[in-house]
Image (cartoon, rainbow, N blue to C red):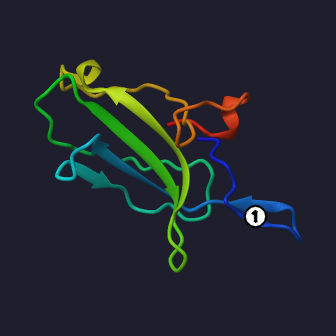
Amino acid sequence: SDLPMMDYDWLRRTGSSDPCVTFEIEGRDDAKQTSEVMFQTVNPQWGAYFTVACDDPEETLKVTVEDYDRFSGNDFMGTCLIDVKTLADRELHRATYYLTDAKGKLRRKPRTWGTI
């Protein structure tokens, strides 16, 4: 929620984003899932389940949010890293994670990056 507006209308001073999310085990190309695109929203709700194969609790789940752009390529919106060992019980988990920039840093106002 509270994702940044990536598609800004300067004339109307409003905007939105077209977010999609990628779930992957860091460093492994074979363990990756991508959500559908939620058009024109900064507060998407997918209501979907994603399964990414992982047997090593020491690995890290990388969640990346991008703004979908059909012709120019997706724009990075934020990312978060989740230790797989916190998900080892294989149960449904509800938690809030602040998105960080590409270097893993939060801005001074974390809400500007959004949460998942």
Q: Residue 15 lies in what quarter of the image?
A: bottom right
Label 1 sits on residue: 8
Residue 89 relative to residue 94: left or right: left
Q: Who's the residue at 69% across and 55% down the image?
A: 5
Query: Dot 1, how many residues are within 10 Å of its Cα: few (below 14), some (14-19), or many (20+)?
Result: few
Q: Who's the residue at 87% across and 67% down the image?
A: 12
Q: Residue 52 lies in what quarter of the image?
A: top left
Q: Position of residue 19 (x, y in %)?
A: 52, 57
Q: Who's the residue at 60% across and 47% down the image?
A: 43
Q: Position of residue 47 (x, y in %)?
A: 39, 47
Q: Is residue 13 visible?
A: yes
- Type of residue at label 1? Tyr
Q: Position of residue 1 (x, y in %)?
A: 59, 41
Q: Who's the residue at 25% across and 51% down the image?
A: 32
Q: Position of residue 42 (x, y in %)?
A: 63, 51
Q: Is residue 27 above or below residue 21?
A: above
Residue at the far left: name it: 55
Residue 107 relative to residue 52: left or right: right
Asked whether 37 or 79 is in front, the reply is 79
Count every numbered label the image shows and give the total: 1
Asked whether 41 or 3 is in front, the reply is 3
Q: Is residue 49 visible?
A: no
| Secondary structure type for disc 1 | strand
